[in-house]
Every structure is written in structure tokens, then in C-alpha cells.
Image (tube, grey):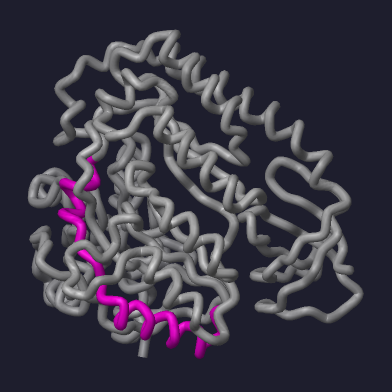
Amino acid sequence: MISKHYFIYTFGCAMNEYDTERIAASLEAKGYIPSDNVEDSDFIVLNTCSVREKPQAKILSYLGQIKILKEKRPDMIVGVSGCVAQQEGDKFLKNNKVVNFVMGTDAVSHIDNVIDRALNGERFADTQVDSNDFSISSFQRKEKIAANVTIMKGCNNFCSYCIVPYVRGREVSRTPEEILNEIKSLIDKGVKEVCLLGQNVNSYGRNLSTNVDFPDLLSMVNKLEGLERIRFVTSHPKDFSDKMIYAMAENEKVCRYLHLPLQSGSDKILKVMNRKYTYADYVEKINKAREVMPDIEFSSDFIIGFPNETDEDFNDTLKAVKEIGYDRIFAFNYSKRPGTKAYNMEDNVPANIKSERLNTLFALQDSLYDEKLPALQGVQTDVLITDINDDKEFPYYGLNMYNRKVAFSSDKNLQCGDTAKVLIKNAKRNCMYGVEV
């Protein structure tokens, strides 16, 4: 019997990575073997992201390469899933003959049926969205130390630049019982850390009949035996509450790291973005979190060159980065996304100005972070080991409670899943290096 192989190319966020695991589990249950090489694969899925223009362009480029492969192997099945699939639907199927099926964001809930239809030779688009409830059936997960767990889907915020509410639907939460059962099953398989996923985790529970919000859920997960760490993304600043701050502080397994996207330091731009907070509102929440947890570290997202962003608006963003002192930032040039409220606004910041501003922002962040690095050397930190490579000078690798990457050496024979206390000898921007003590 000839083995069949599958290949999944995942673009975008952690929720896409989680959905990729669900797709892979279904394919393996049908006898497919994972491959790292698209050329020898029989079933290919591109799990896509439409939040920015560049990933969508990469998808079309990748399909061009796959077209050449399929001309030689016409029996190869090619599917497109995720947000681009949801956004484009039948149009994507019509414009890309190499594609056998288009699977929207909710279709992964019945992935077995999607795969069967594709294997039976049907060419189709499945993009129906269900915002009434949200449940994920148990599926076979790969053994790992850290795992993602989706707790909700969708978004009700309708930021003017964002396509998510249109491709992921309205906010719907899984029940606490279902989430806890999934995490318990992961713990039984050796997972020590979970990352709770949602477009806006602070809205968790609002559609449920049970009176459980996200801080309550954190406390429930914190009580699970065998679990050592809890992370979560993403928090919307307008919903980040004092209750949330105290939940982070009081539950010892919750990491002291918060990703809280500001997007712009200009109140004028924030208003047009429909972010529903001012810079002063945001800073108040940051200061409160630092008051309760002095060691907490922050990261943020920024969109550069939003329509009508002036030099003054951009300087407000630079000022915010200086004042807040982020430990890391993620920033991107604005690009129009079809279907969003900002799509009809004139994209009037020239591309060269966007690039200059983006480079300026990154240079500022790098310089500010470099000033922090000396203080990190000589510090001891607990690292949960997720990878081991004996060929490297620092064979053990993992994250600490502040989401910092750490590579280190040890005289002991450590295993993935162990937590080691590491003395940092050299702190660099992308990783810290040390030795177990």
C-alpha cells in the first residue's frame, strides 16, 4: 500500500496554528502521514490570514508554485482554509483553478466532512458562519510541552481597519467545562503550559448562560494540577479591567507578561480606528497593572501610516513607546483590507513615508530595549524547557515567565518539560543566554 502524505502551510495567528492541529488530526485519522515537503504531498492545505495584505499576496504566490506541481500530479488535492478562504469564498475558487476546495473559518468544525467531499472529487466552497454557539470536539494533539487552547472566536469591536469580525463572526465562547476538559487531557499528555486564545479574551463568557468571565476562567485553569504556566492573547485595552489585573496577580501560574495592543499613540487616529479608548485611558491601565505587579512586562501592536496620520500623530506614537517602555513591539504598515470601514478612506500616507516611520519606530524600540539589557545580566530566571539541541553551545531552550527566550547550558541531563533556574550571562534582543544554577 502506497502511503499518502499531507502538507499544511500555516499563515497568521496562533488561532490558525490551533486550527491547523485540528486539520492535521483529521487527515492523520484518515491515514495521511505528515510531510515537511510540499513536493511529495498528496493533500495540501494553505491555512490563511487576511489581516494584512502581505500574507494574502504570499498565498497567491505559493499557489503559483503549487500549480506547477499539480500539472505533473493532477490527483493532488489542494485546499485553502482560514480567513482568506472565508473572505473570498466562491470567488477564490473561481479565480484559482488549482484549488479543490475553500474552507472558511467555521468549516474546520466539520473538517472530516470537508476532507471526504474533497476526496470524492467535489470542488466546493464552505464558508457558512455560525455565531450561535462554539464547541470544539476533542481531537488528537501532538505531544508537546506548551499548547494553544482556543477559548472563544469572533470579535464585536469592529475596529475600522480590521477584517476579523467579518471573517470570524461575532464573539462566541466555549463553555468553561469544555475548555477545562481539553486542558486536562493536554496535561495528561505532558503539557506544562497553555496559551488561551481569542480575538479578545477579555470578552470571554459574555454569551454564556454561566456567570463566568475571563478572570474567573483564569482562576479555574490555575487550579488544575500538573499545569505550570498560563499565557493568553489577545487583550483589547477597552476591556482590560482591574479584575483582570488582580486575576493575573493572584494566580501564580499566570505569566507576568501582557500583550496589550495600543495601535497608535494619537487620540485622533485611535478615534478613527474605532478603538474606543484614549491614550490616557490606556496609560492608566498600564500604570495600574504595574502598581499591582511591579515586574510585569508589556508588548504592543502598532499600525503605521493609517489614513491621515500626520507627522504629529506619528510622533505621538513614538512618545508613547518611550513613556510606556515596552519590552517588545509588533508593528506593520497600514494596508487596506476589503470589507472594513477604513477601506473607503483614502490611503493617503505615501508608501515611502510609511516605511520611514516604521523603521524609525523599530530603531527607537531597539535602542530603548538595548538600555534594559545590561540589567538582565546576572539575574536568575526560571525557564520551562521546550526544546533541546545537544549540538548547540546552549542546548536547552525555553521561555521564562516574562515571555523572554532563554538558551542555556547545564551539567545535568535535563528533559523537555523540566523547569530550570538559569543565571543569565549574556542578554541580547532576541534571546538571553546563561547557565543552570
Query: In this view of the protein, can residue 250 be seen by the observer?
Result: yes
Q: Looking at the picture, how far across and down is residue 85, in whole percent?
A: 20, 52
Q: Looking at the picture, how far across and down is residue 388, in whole percent?
A: 72, 70
Q: Residue at x 81, y 62 (%)?
A: 408
Rendered view: 372 above or below 383: above
Q: Main secondary structure of the magenta part?
A: helix
Magenta residues, start to end: 163-191
Q: Quadrant of residue 365?
A: top right
Q: Residue at x 76, y 43 (%)?
A: 428
Q: Looking at the picture, how far across and down is residue 406, in whole percent?
A: 73, 57
Query: In this view of the protein, can residue 393 be seen by the observer?
Result: no
Is residue 188 highlighted in magenta? yes
Count of all numbered marks drawn on residues in the image: 0
Q: Residue at x 47, y 65 (%)?
A: 195
| For residue 221, side relative to residue 210 (left or right) | right
- Rendered-image quadrant of the N terminus: bottom left
Is residue 378 highlighted in magenta? no
Rendered view: 436 above or below 354: below
Rendered view: 340 above or below 414: above
